[in-house]
Image (tube, helix red, strand yellow):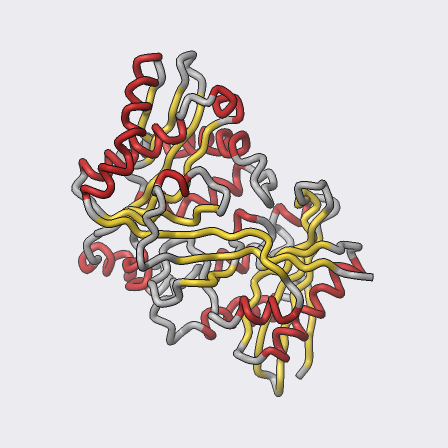
Amino acid sequence: MAINHFTFDRKSIDRFVRFGQDLYHTDLNYLPGDNKSMARLFSPDYSFYSQIGNAHRQFLATCDGKILGRISAIKNKDLKDHDDQPVGCVGYFECVNDYAVASDLLQAAINWLYQEQGLRRIWGPMNFDIWHGYRFMTKGFEHKTFLGEPYNKSYYPEYFERFGFRIRQQWDTVELHGKELLHGLIEKGLVTRDILLEKGYRFEPFRSNRFSAEINKLHTLIQNSFGGFLGFTPIDLNDFIRLFLPVRAIFDSRFFIFMYDEQDRLAGFAGAFPEISDWIRMANGKSGYWSKFKLLWQRPPIRKILFYFGGITQQEAAKRMGLGKAGFAYTIEQVLLAGFDQIIMALMAADSKARGFVKGNWATDHRQYALYQYDVLT
């Protein structure tokens, strides 16, 4: 077995990208991605490489010309831990079920990050940053993946831990079913919402006909409200817009809201989306005209709503008015009024207030994820 490394070699990048979908082609739970979008991130034109201090290296494990695994080693100059120590990333990890392959790939990536970039603390999996995919699924492999959910081979977490990585942070996803349960979850939040309305707060829907302006507002809010999250790094507005373009067609203004305080200042947001993973599987990750035609005429009905994220500004959080709970309650009420009674509460961090909203209603379809950390010892 050989470990080959490269940066912007186009032929190698094509093989690197294709290997991921080749590995999952028989996995019915896998959600096909967009190879072109991924390949763009490894082009020298990607804005990440124009920032002084950023660097990356790709590694392929091969045997007799056959790819057995891949990994990226990434230095993001903006990525720091809570103690201000710089952090390197290992991302885009995929490999066959062979620990020797995984170990050699991890060692090659870590050696480059430490010896060439001077980084001793390493997180993985993380693809450049938290915006482009990170975390392993560690529980819940029997479920179909929803859009934006981490998914991987079940043996990956074991391989990372065997190598010496430890869990740094965990997240959970649960599915909540039934109108009675959902009404009970939001009862107190609706009381808080009504109090805030009386004080002059506003809850306004996302205006799909002004998509660019609304995404600009969302970008501003996220930069403010997520600043203290583990792994948070600033993201360029154009890159942020590009991330949201694939879901533009499924924005439902009833389920995605902005919140304003009594002085008409942007104070928070809450976002839920129709769960369309089966549509994507039907198109097999393609975006051509024929795939769109098939989706138009054959798409399965939407039965679930994905509550993906929400946040309030630091200024609003300091008031302790309960706006986050009110925004959650407002959004779920709209979901119920639209006739849905199945909610996926997605990717709740272990220390997230969202976990309190669901009040311990961990269903049997509970899923779990983890970000890992490795410390180079000298």
Look at the image and tell me whether residue 255 can be seen: yes
**Front-most of 29 and 347?**
347
The residue drawn where x is 35% and y is 12% is: 199
| 286 lies left or right of 301 | right
Q: Residue furthest bottom?
A: 64
Q: Position of residue 185 (x, y in %)?
A: 28, 38
Of the 4 image quadrants, the one containing the C terminus is bottom right
Count of number-bearing discs: 0
Residue at image location 35% in from the left, 67% down from the top? 142
Residue at 60%, 67% in the rendered image: 160
Q: Is residue 23 left or right of residue 49?
A: left
- Depth check, front residue: 366 or 240: 366
What is the x, y in percent for residue 300?
20, 58
> Is residue 291 positioned above or below 199 on the image?
below
Q: Is residue 279 left or right of residue 297?
A: right
On the image, the x and y values in percent for residue 108 come to 71, 69
Left or right of residue 188: residue 246: right
Quarter of image, res 264:
top left
Q: Decide if residue 14 is in sight here.
A: no
Quadrant in which the N terminus is drawn: bottom right
Q: Nearer the viewer, residue 51 or 153?
A: 153
At 41% across and 43% down in the image, what residue appears? 355
In the image as oriented, which residue stretches furthest toward the front? 360
Q: Quadrant of residue 234?
A: top right
Task: Report which quarter residue 325 is drawn in.
Answer: top left
Q: Position of residue 192 (x, y in %)?
A: 32, 23
